[in-house]
Amino acid sequence: MNFSKGDIVIIPVPFTDNKGYKLRPAVVISNDMVHQTGDVMIVQITSKLKQDNHFSIPITDDDVTEGLPVKSYIRVHKIFVLEQRLIKGKVSSLKIAKYQELIQRINQIIE
């Protein structure tokens, strides 16, 4: 499977006891150079607005190519590296303006 920056994918997120997992959405932020290694960099998406909402970017249907089933938020500080083979599929993509907002927010927290 090939993925691009901004793709919203479904990944397995393990339970804390490591005896199972839930499927959860995430946004791909890595480029082809990273993908050639077999890895992908992703940012967590959740349906729960947290108290530290300055780390959350809301996603509306206008922000994506395919609507998401529930109101969702990108958690800009929850960045992970995952083997591409673990991705279960692609469900949507962020539109360019929302992807650029995400990258700007990530830059703000790492500068």
Image: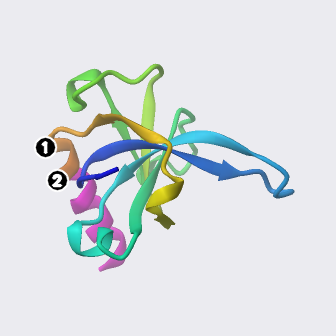
- Label 2 CA crowd tier, 10 Å (few <14, some 14–19, many 20+): few
Q: Secondary structure at mark 2?
A: helix
Distance (Cα) linking label 2 and label 1: 5 Å
Q: Can you give x and y, in whole percent of width and height, for residue 55 in the image? A: 44, 54
Q: Is residue 95 left or right of residue 29?
A: left
Please, what is the three-letter code of the amino acid marked with disc 1?
Answer: Ala
Q: Can you give x and y, in whole percent of width and height, for residue 63 in the image? A: 23, 31
Quadrant assignment for the C terminus: bottom left
62 shown above or below 3: above
Q: Secondary structure at mark 1?
A: helix
Indicate yes or no whether the magenta region holds residue 104. yes
Q: Residue furthest bottom?
A: 111
Closer-to-camera residue (63/6): 6
In the image, which disc is placed on residue 100?
A: 2
Whether residue 41 is visible here, answered yes or no, is yes
105 shown above or below 15: below
* Rendered residue at 23%/53% (across/down): 4
Indicate yes or no whether the magenta region holds residue 18. no
Quarter of the image holding residue 29? bottom left
Quarter of the image holding residue 98? top left
* Rendered residue at 36%/36% (across/down): 58
Q: Which residue is mark 1?
A: 97
* Rendered residue at 23%/66% (across/down): 31
In the rendered structure, are the residues bearing label 2 and label 1 in contact, judged by CB atoms less than 8 Å apart? yes
**What range is drawn magenta here?**
100-111
